[in-house]
Amino acid sequence: MLSAAGLLAAMTTAGDAVASPVAGRAKGGGRPEAAPGRVRGMWIATVANLDWPSAPGLTAARQEAELFAYLDRAVELRLNAVVLQVRPTADALWPSPYEPWAACLTGTQGEDPGWDPLGTAVRAAHDRSLELHAWFNPYRVANHTDPGRLVACHPARLNPDWGVPYGGKLYYNPGLPEVRRFVQDAMLDAVRRYDIDAVHWDDYFYPYPVAGRSFDDDAAFERYGGGFEDRASWRRDNIDRLVRETGQRIRRIKPHVRFGISPFAVWRNAATDPRGSDTRAGVQTYDDLYADTRKWIKEGWIDYICPQIYWHIGFAAADYARVLAWWSETVRGTGVDLYVGEALYKAGDPAQPDPWQDPAELSRHLTLAREHEEVGGHVFFSAKRVMADRIGAMRRVVADHYTGRVRLYPDRGRTYPHRGRPSG
């Protein structure tokens, strides 16, 4: 368990220049070099025990066995990457000097599970020629609003002014520079310690809007927002800084480690901005989450983008085909790779419309993506659905598209994503 003294010591750790890069993995300018081939991945979610561990409080041996079962299934399905959530709610799946042990492991935040899940996952994935992308959530603190329910040494309790309750959850305030530095330090600890292949973020920046609620960052805006024309511009700048600075720091620490983000798939609707997509989505990341995903690509701050295109082909408000085309055009010529987040969880769900009852819907997504040379692969949400595969949609994808495993960098038995036109 992290002590208050340990937290303060961790927060003052200086310097990023540790761990030499792996030879031959960095391009000029410090950008990670990637190789031909398509990413075939799946997300393994740990928040609220969504995928893994199947329940809190299992023995270390049982947790490890469940993890290995997911990795073995990935190999059987000819996948080459897993995206493991290692910082679900401002806590950690490794012995972090910054944050407490994750509650999803033992059921009690801060309680040592008796093993190192991230370290074990990295070794086990690489032993199976799988990439391990470490998935972090930058600002979510808790799925409730009571700091008193956090372990006593939690940074959000030691720094109560850092937290903002909103929509039944607790978040770190992205408008505070000390918060931005702290969450970077907490995540980059894993980059230093482990041979991860990528840092991966999902779609949570400023929280999704809740009707009738406002995110209370008045004090931070008054203190830091004076140079901006409005609060929205200031909020976007806060997230821009987080993205830009994190990418820079990763490249200083380990230039071969990639940085990727998996956003909600609509940047802006074309009716809002002519540069936007031909969609009528109720949420636009630029306006509602203050996440300028298009800018991050154009500026080259990230190495890959993995939009969650969680709609079927022909969906009126956000047609998979049209959204995919927009992202392909957006990354073209930028050097930023495009992977597509796929909604396997919808396949066979009786609450979903008819296209999702067809086992071939996801396979059609991959067929369509072949028409866009910018698409470098697909990542499926999530591991539990990959295992269950209730109507055989995943098996159909494998049969139609995954003939043989993609193995790159045979010197280490590892697979790395492509840059440029995929070849397999």
Image (tube, grey):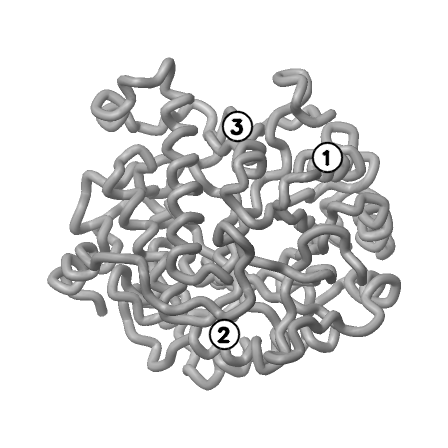
23 horizontally vs 408: left or right:
left
Q: Secondary structure at mark 3?
A: helix
Query: Is 60 placed above or below 149 here?
Result: below
* Nearest the eye: 19 or 60: 19
Q: Secondary structure at mark 1?
A: helix
Kind of residue at disc 1: Glu
The residue at 41%/48% (across/down) is 248
Identify residue for label 1.
Answer: 329
Can you give x and y, in whole percent of width and height, for residue 309 in the image? 69, 43
> Gap between marks 2 and 1, in whole Å?
34 Å
Mark nearer the N terminus (3 vs 2)? 2
Query: Is 56 placed above or below 9 here?
Result: below
Q: Quadrant of the N terminus?
A: bottom left
The residue at 40%/63% (across/down) is 191
The image quadrant that residue 326 belongs to is top right
Query: Is 205 placed above or below 394 here?
Result: above
Mark nearer the N terminus (3 vs 1)? 3
- State if disc 1 and disc 3 touch (CB < 8 Å): no
Residue that lies at the very extreme toward the front in this rendered image: 28
The image quadrant that residue 130 belongs to is bottom right
Identify residue for label 2.
Answer: 122
Residue 50 seen anywhere in this rendered image of the structure: no
Kind of residue at disc 2: Val
Residue count near mark 2 (Cα–Cα under 10 Å), binned few <14, some 14–19, many ≥20 = many
> Gap between marks 3 and 2, in whole Å?
34 Å
Mark sitting on residue 286: 3
- State if disc 1 and disc 2 touch (CB < 8 Å): no
